[in-house]
């Protein structure tokens, strides 16, 4: 009886996964079809704005202000559709042994100008002894971008972002600790749900997409947060046994 129940359970899971793939493919295709005419609207709004800018009358200025509103909403919808397509269409991962430290360094360097301008000190503690993990560079980079962007946006008046890699019993962990605004318990519980956002104009898909990307690597992500004190994300990746003992340590350490 137990064996039969297990088989039925596996079959149900298989069917649900297939249904999810079909829904994801349909949703992604629909978003793509919406994006095409939206691009045409945006392009024509841009041309109309150029024409109106040449006509210096009170009526043209009022019309130009309205066109600007339409352009901003077109850009917002376009960004939302991009986020949705990334969330709905998680591509097949090309997992190869790689350095988590190097991936983290690259993404932090992307945000270095923004962090400096905002007055955020980025402290890097990347353990040189962490082994390689199996990763897909493009997918993992997108996940890290979402998480670090979220941390920086939580510190509009400056602060500290501590980034640390370390060995754990299960594999390799990455800690992202900010001294930002923090979140209440309700927000922390729902932040990885699709379309949940507390930000004006936010799509609510950045963090869910990041979690999907991390879980696709066999990893997991946890969050601890306190209002007024900051947030800590911990991401843990498994280390295949053939890599844990058979390769030299990957990555370098840096601190600032």
Image (cartoon, rainbow, N blue to C red):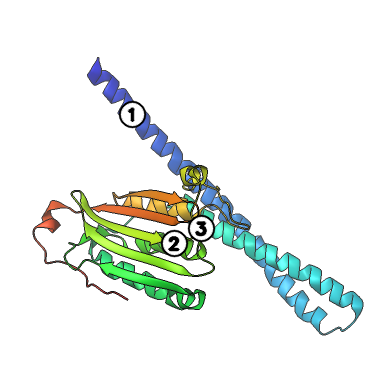
**Is residue 113 shown above or below 173?**
below
Q: Of circles 1 and 2, which is in front? A: 2
- Going 57% across and 55% down the picture, which residue do you hit? 203
- Residue designated by label 1: 11
Q: Label 1 neighbourhood size at 10 Å, few (<14), some (14-19), many (20+)?
A: few
**Of callouts 1 and 2, the N-terminal one:** 1
Q: Is residue 91 visible?
A: no
Kind of element beneath mark 2: loop
**Pointer 1 with pointer 2, Cβ within 8 A:** no
Residue 104 badge: none
Q: Position of residue 112 (x, y in %)?
A: 42, 76
Q: Position of residue 212 (x, y in %)?
A: 40, 50
**Pointer 3 with pointer 1, Cβ within 8 A:** no
**Pointer 2 with pointer 3, Cβ within 8 A:** no
Q: Position of residue 237 (x, y in %)?
A: 26, 53
Residue 181 badge: 3
């Amino acid at each position: 009886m137990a064996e039969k129940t297990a088989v039925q359970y596996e079959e149900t899971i298989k069917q649900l996964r297939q249904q999810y793939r079909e829904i994801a493919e349909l949703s992604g295709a629909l978003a793509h079809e919406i994006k095409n005419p939206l691009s045409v609207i945006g392009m024509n709004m841009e041309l109309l704005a150029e024409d109106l800018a040449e006509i210096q009358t009170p009526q043209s200025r009022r019309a130009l202000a309205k066109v600007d509103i339409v352009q901003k909403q077109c850009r917002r919808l376009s960004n939302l559709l991009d986020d949705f397509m990334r969330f709905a269409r998680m591509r097949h991962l090309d997992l190869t042994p790689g350095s988590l430290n190097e991936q983290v360094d690259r993404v932090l360097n992307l945000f270095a100008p923004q962090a400096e301008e905002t007055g955020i000190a980025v402290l890097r503690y990347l353990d040189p002894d962490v082994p390689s993990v199996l990763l897909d560079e493009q997918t993992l980079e997108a996940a890290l971008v979402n998480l670090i962007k979220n941390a920086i946006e939580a510190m509009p008046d400056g602060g500290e972002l501590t980034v640390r890699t370390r060995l754990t019993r299960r594999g390799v962990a990455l800690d992202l600790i900010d001294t930002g605004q923090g979140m209440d318990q309700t927000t922390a519980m729902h932040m990885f749900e699709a379309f949940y956002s507390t930000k004006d104009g936010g799509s609510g898909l950045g963090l869910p997409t990041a979690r999907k990307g991390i879980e696709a690597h066999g990893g997991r992500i946890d969050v601890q947060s306190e209002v007024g004190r900051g947030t800590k994300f911990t991401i843990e990746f498994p280390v295949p046994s053939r890599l844990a003992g058979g390769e030299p340590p990957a990555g370098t350490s840096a601190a600032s």
